[in-house]
Amino acid sequence: MTEPVKRLAPSVTISDCASEVFCTRFSPDGKLLAAGCGDGAIRVFNVHDGKLSYTLVQPQSSLGFGLPCTAIRFRPLTSATKTKNVLLAASSNGSVEHWHITSGKCLNAISNNQNQLYALDYRADGAMFATGGKDHAIRVYDEATKAEVACMDSGHGTLTAGHSNRVFSIKFVPEDDNTIVSGGWDNTLQIWDVRVGHSVRGIYGPHVAGDAVDMNTRGEILTGSWRPENPLEIWDFGSGKRLTTVPWNQSAIRSEPCFLYTAHFSRSNTGQQLIAAGGSGSNEAKVFNHDSNNKLVGTIAGLSHGVFTLDFAASDDKMVVAGADAAIRIIDIYDHVPGEKSRERPTTPSIRNAHLPHENLTRLASPALSAEALRAPSSPLHRMAVHDA
C-alpha cells in the first residue's frame, strides 16, 4: 500500500488586514487566529471563514499610541486555568499585556518603558512566562501573581556570557520547567536555568532575527537564521551540536536565497512532525516533513513582500503565513495517497506542492535580491524601534 504524503491547499486568505503582521498564533482549540499588527492592534479572526471576530487595542502609553505588537501567545489550557481565551502580548513599547479575547478587556499590563520587547513564551503548564528584547535580558514572571521571579542577563564563568545583543526568540524547553532557550542578533543560542538565574551554556551559530527558535519533545532545537546560506538548522539540545542543515532549495529550479524570520516545528505528537519556515529575499515560506528526512512538502511563494510569521494549529491540519504584505493566509495540511487524483485538492499559483507533474514548469518569479536588501537591518522589528540608541 502506498504511504500517504503531506500536501498543502488554500483555506482562507484575509487580505484586508490594516497593516503589516508581525506575529500570529492559533488558539489551543484551533478555532481562532490572533494576529499582532504593526499599528498596535491585535486582530482575532475566525479560522473557518476568516472573518474578524475581535480587535484588541493596546492602551495609550507615555511613548505614544499604536506601537507595534511584536509577539503573542495563548495561555495554555490546563486544569488550573479558570479563565479561557487569554492572550499574552508583547509590544515594542516594552509592555506585556494579558488580554481576555471574548470580552476585549486588558486584564493586566506590565510596563518597562526603557525596553523594547520582541519575544515571549509560556511554560507548558502556563504557570510562568518569559520575555526578551532590546536589553539582552530574559525576564521570567509568575503567571498567577504577575511578579517577576528572575531577570537573567549574564552567563557563568568562561562557559557563556549571556546575550550581547537583542533577543528575538524565546522557547521554554518541553518537559523541563526550569530551562529556556533564546536566540538573537549575537549569533548564539543561550540556555538559561531559572533556578540559578543565568545562562549555563551557549551554542554558537544561528543569527536569529524573529520568532525562529523552537524545540520538540525529542530534544531537538530548530533555528532559522537571517542569512543567505544554510538558514535552517537543527541542533541537539543535550550536546549543543548541529545535527543537520535542512536544504532550503530541494528543487532543480534555481531560487533566490531566503533570509528567515520565522521557523517552527508542528505541535502534535501523534502524527508526522513537520517544519515550516519563511522570510524575505525570495519572499516565501516552505514546509518540510521532519520524519521523512526533512523532505520538502510544499512552498508558499510568489509573495510581494517578506514572511514575518507563521504557526501550526495544535492538530497540525492547518498553518498560517503572514508578513509585510498585510495578508494572512490560512492553509490546510492534509494526507494524500499518490495516484489518487480524485482526492487531490486544488491549489493556487502561490502554493506549490512538491513532486507534482507541474513542479518542472517555470518557477513563479521571485523578486531579485537587491543590494539594499542585503544591507537592510536583519529584523523587521528593528524598523519599529522606539527611542532607539
Image (cartoon, rainbow, N blue to C red):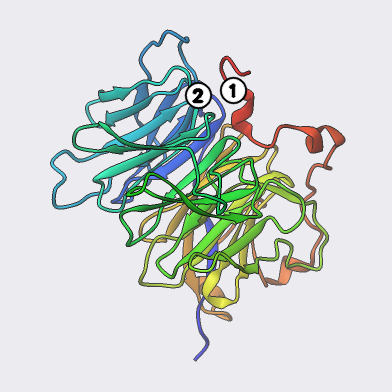
Percent position (x, y) of residue 183? 55, 46
- How many neighbours does mark 2 have within 10 angstroms: few (below 14), some (14-19), or many (20 or more)? many
Q: Residue at x 44, y 23 (%)?
A: 94
Q: Amino acid at mark 1?
A: Met
Relative depth, front residue between 146 and 161: 161
Which residue position is annotated with label 2? 68
Tell how many labels.
Answer: 2
Quadrant of res 15: top right
Percent position (x, y) of residue 190? 52, 50
Looking at the rendered image, the quarter that the C terminus falls into is: top right
The residues bearing labels 2 and 1 have C-alpha atoms spaced at a distance of: 7 Å
- How many neighbours does mark 1 have within 10 angstroms: few (below 14), some (14-19), or many (20 or more)? some
> Does residue 73 show up?
yes
> Does residue 321 show up?
no
Q: Amino acid at mark 2?
A: Pro
Percent position (x, y) of residue 47? 38, 45
Above or below 93: residue 3: below
Tell me whether the residue at label 2 lies in contact with that at label 1, contact meaning CB atoms closer than 8 angstroms. yes
SS category of the residue bearing label 1? helix
Percent position (x, y) of residue 133? 51, 32
Q: Residue at x 61, y 45 (%)?
A: 208
**Of callouts 2 and 1, the N-terminal one:** 2
Relative depth, front residue between 153 and 383: 153
Disc marking residue 384 = 1
Q: Residue at x 76, y 67 (%)?
A: 251
Quadrant of res 168: top right
Answer with left or right where residue 348 lies relative to residue 255. left
Disc marking residue 197 = none
Relative depth, front residue between 200 and 135: 200
Q: Residue at x 30, y 55 (%)?
A: 177
Above or below 229: residue 164: above
Answer with left or right where residue 29 lies relative to residue 165. left
